[in-house]
Amino acid sequence: MSFVNYHTKEVNCKIVYYGPGLGGKTTNIQHVYKRTAGNNKGKMVTLNTENERTLFFDFLPLDLAEIRGFKTRMHLYTVPGQVIYEASRKLILRGVDGVVFVADSQVDKMEANLESFEGLKKNLLEQGYDIEKIPVVMQWNKRDLPNTASIQELEKKLNNYDFPSFEASALNGEGVFETLKSISKHVLLNIKGGL
Ligand SMILES: Nc1nc2c(ncn2[C@@H]2O[C@H](COP(=O)(O)OP(=O)(O)OP(=O)(O)O)[C@@H](O)[C@H]2O)c(=O)[nH]1
Ligand SMILES: [Mg+2]
């Protein structure tokens, strides 16, 4: 749940990058970290296994421009995509304000994408959130690879809710900030009435 402090004039929001294992969630926020000026970002925290898979989560605090005199800070989290870490995913979704679903565009990853998206819906519901009522942005990642499903197919299979969607190649940074801007905008619009 976003946290608005009227006394210090600060807004804090939580954005969670969710999706199948090796889809590129960590790569997204690594790119954001690399391309953000030092005074606008906090320390990036990464908890990895020895082979670079996310073990618990990644975390990056990011400052945006002031809105109506409020300092706005986005807390970016990634979940671990590996199937066995369901408990961590549930925990990280607590208090979420917006979700970026990072899908792996490779043809043979469709099942993993579908399974992960179903898990997202279920885990949100368990925390009392309806996926249709919170901001969600879809990212079709790894567009640079040769064996990718078409955008139409990804939309048809994974985007029944018609969420905003972006093509990306997180490894070279394409689409990363477009995705982040879109989810930030929707999250802020959601709370703007309260500012
Ligand atoms: N070719 C290509 N490779 C990518 C892209 N995005 C990520 N990768 C690679 O895919 C692998 C997995 O990326 P991660 O960002 O660690 O994936 P993740 O979703 O955080 O994985 P988990 O933490 O296990 O859930 C890495 O080797 C990345 O370099 C992309 O757009 N194109
Ligand atoms: Mg990761």
Image (cartoon, grey):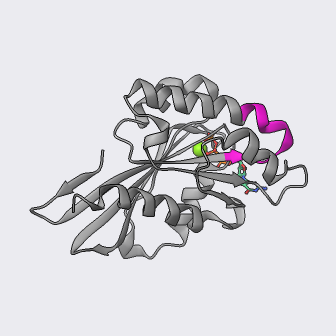
Q: Which residue is painted at 61% across and 29% down in the image?
A: 118
* Depth check, front residue: 18 or 155: 155
Toward the left, the furthest residue is 7
Across and down, in percent, residue 188 comes to 36, 61
User: Would you place residue 88 above or below residue 32 in this image?
Assistant: above
Residue for point 66% across, 67% down: 173
Magenta span covers which residues? 103-112
- Against 8, residue 120 (above or below) is above
Residue 156 position, x and y percent, is 75, 43
- Per the image, is 106 magenta? yes
Image quadrant assignment for residue 184: bottom left
Whether residue 109 is visible, yes or no, is: yes
Whole-percent x and y of residue 189?
37, 61
Is 195 on the left or on the right of 77, as rendered?
Answer: left
Q: Name above or below for residue 54 compared with residue 42.
A: above
x and y percentages locating residue 138 in the rendered image = 62, 50
Residue 88 in view? no
Relative horizontal placement of residue 166, taking residue 54 as reference (left or right): right
* Number of numbered markers: 0
Q: Residue at x 21, y 56 (%)?
A: 4
Q: Quadrant of the N terminus?
A: top left
Which image quarter is the C terminus in? bottom left
Secondary structure, magenta segment, majority class: helix
Above or below: residue 109 compared with residue 74: above
Can residue 169 be found in the magenta stretch? no
Q: Which of the 4 image quadrants contains residue 187?
A: bottom left
